[in-house]
Image (cartoon, rainbow, N blue to C red):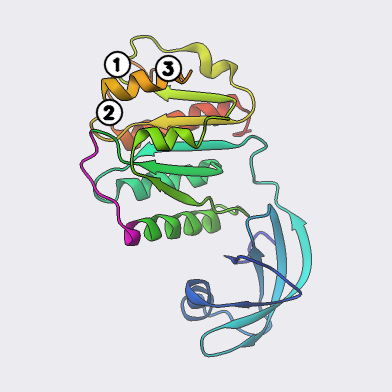
Amino acid sequence: MSGLRRFFTDKIEEFTEITGDEYSHAINTLRCGVGDEIILCDNSGWDHICEIIEVKKKSFVAKSKEKRFNDTETSSEVTLVCGYLKGDKTEYVVQKAVELGVKKIIVFSSEFSSAYMNDNKLARLNKVSVEAAKQCGRSIAPKVIYKENFSSAIDCIKNCKNRLFFYENKTNYATHICSVKGDCAVVIGSEGGFSEAEAALAASEGFVTVSLGKRILRADTASVCALSLVMYELGELE
C-alpha cells in the first residue's frame, strides 16, 4: 500500500467526494481514474484505502475499502514556532518540519522580521505542508497558523511541557535537549534573530534557552538543525 498516492480531505465517509486542489492533483496531474486505489487522509492519524468509482468534471468520488493506522506519526507532539522569513525560506522550513514529523507550525513576525505575511502567503504555506505530508507518507498535514508578534505566538504553547528557545546570544550549548521527553516546542527567530525584549519575555515565561554552537546559523538552517536534534533525542528518528 506504500505505493498508493495519498490525498487530504476534511472528512472521510463510505463515499467521499474530492474537489479543489486535491481533485486537480489526482485527476489532471497524476491521471488517476476509475478503478484506481488511493489513500485518503483526514488528519486523524489513519490512512483510508479507497477506490475511485466516479470522475466528474470538477470532483471525483472514492469508496472507502479499508482503514489502517499510520505508524509514521510521532508519539510526541512537537511544535515549531518560527519567525517569518524572506522569499521562499519559510516554505523550505515548513516543508522540512513536516518531513521531520512536526505536528504544529506557528509562524510569527518578530521585531526583526523584514518580510510581511498576507492571506495568499499563508495559504501557500499550508499547501506546502500538505504536499510535504504526501511526499513523506504522513497521515497528518500540520496546519500553519500565523501570529502578528512573538508574544501571541508563544501564548499558543504556554501549556507545552518542554519549551526550547534557540538563541544566538546563548554562549554554551545546553544539555537540556538531551533530557527532553514528551511534548516539545522549538522556538526559532527570523533572519535578524530575537530582540533583547523577546529574549527577556521568553525567559520570564520559563523557556529554556539553548544554543546551536559557536557559529551563527541562518534561520532556516537553525530550524532544521534544532528540530533534528529534538526528534533524535525523542527517539523519533529511529
Which residue is pictured at 47% across the width and 72% down the height? Answer: 21
Instruction: Please determine whether, in this image, residue 132 is positioned above or below residue 49.
Output: above
Q: Give the number of the disc on residue 204.
A: 3
Closer to the chain start, of discs 2 and 3, is 2
Is 117 magenta? The answer is yes
Q: Quadrant of residue 173?
A: top left
Which residue is pictured at 71% across the width and 72% down the height? Answer: 50
Instruction: Please determine whether, in this image, residue 168 is positioned above or below residue 94.
Output: above
Q: What's the residue type where badge 1 is placed?
A: Asn
Magenta residues? 112-121
| Front one among 62 and 232 | 62
| Marks 2 & 1, CB-CB < 8 Å contact | yes
32 vs 223, left or right, is right
Task: Read off the residue under disc 1.
Answer: 169
Q: What's the residue type where badge 3 is placed?
A: Ser
Q: Residue furthest bottom?
A: 57
Q: Position of residue 54 (x, y in %)?
A: 65, 87
| Gap in angstroms between the C-alphas marked 2 and 3 | 18 Å
